[in-house]
Image (spheres, rainbow, N blue to C red):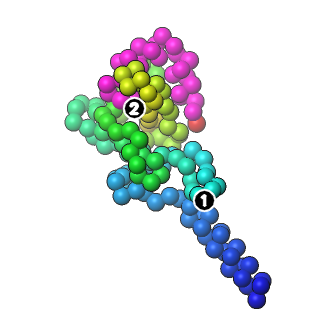
């Protein structure tokens, strides 16, 4: 009897651990959202990370992006534009979200961290209002750009 209880307990813990590895998409995030894991919270038995979604925005090349915590609390939302490494020229931003980690940099306008979202075409999406200042900064300090590109 004790053995059966232990087996059931182990099966339940195994199921719970496997279920928690794949967090449910929050209701406020679209189906094309991607979860980017950053670790594991043993105390709450859940993955840490952020949900990211980007859809076409209102302007040419704009993407409306939203970044939330695993439970759907919005961390950052706004219009983003693509930036490419070669001379920091604009990318077309037509590709999907890459599977690499989300980068965070101090935004020149917000004076607080803003997300830098990697795309599969090699471009990075940055907040539209911060884009020109970030390009100037990355041209002056290319090591910061290289560090962002190697966040995988």
Tag nearer the camera, 1 or 2: 1
Secondary element at tag 2: strand
What is the quadrant of residue 113 in the picture?
A: top left
Whether 120 is drawn above or below 83: the answer is: below
Structural crowding at the residue carrying mark 2, measured as other residues with C-alpha within 10 Å and reported as few (<14), some (14–19) or many (≥20): many
> If the image is split into quadrants, where does the N terminus sit?
bottom right
Disc 2 target residue:
125
**Would residue 133 be counted in the magenta stretch?**
yes
For the stretch drawn in magenta, what is the main secondary structure?
helix
Q: In which quadrant is the C terminus drawn?
A: top right
- At x 28% / y 40%, what residue is drawn? 56
Residue bearing the label numbered 1: 45
Residue at (46% x, 47% y) in the render: 69
User: Who's the residue at 46% across and 60% down the image?
Assistant: 24
Which of 90 and 74 lies nearest the eye of the viewer?
A: 74
The segment highlighted magenta reads 124-151
Residue 128 within the segment the image draws in magenta: yes
Instruction: Please provide percent x and percent y for residue 136.
Output: 41, 13
- Of all residues shown, which one is farthest toward the front? 43
**Badge 1 or badge 2: first in the primary sequence:** 1
Q: Secondary structure at mark 1?
A: loop
Locate residue 71, reporting x and y percent: 45, 54
Q: Position of residue 151 (x, y in %)?
A: 57, 33
């Amino acid at each position: 009897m004790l053995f059966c209880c232990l087996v059931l307990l182990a099966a339940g813990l195994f199921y719970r651990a496997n279920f928690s590895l794949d967090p449910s998409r929050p209701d406020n995030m679209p189906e094309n959202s991607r979860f980017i894991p950053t670790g594991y919270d043993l105390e709450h038995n859940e993955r840490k990370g952020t949900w990211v979604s980007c859809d076409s925005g209102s302007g040419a090349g704009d993407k409306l992006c939203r970044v939330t915590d695993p439970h759907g609390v919005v961390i950052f939302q706004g219009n983003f534009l693509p930036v490419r490494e070669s001379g920091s020229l604009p990318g077309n931003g037509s590709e999907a979200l890459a599977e690499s980690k989300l980068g965070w940099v101090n935004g020149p306008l917000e004076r607080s961290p803003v997300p830098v979202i990697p795309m599969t075409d090699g471009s990075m999406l940055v907040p539209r209002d911060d884009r020109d200042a970030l390009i100037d900064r990355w041209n002056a300090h290319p090591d910061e750009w290289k560090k962002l590109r190697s966040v995988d």
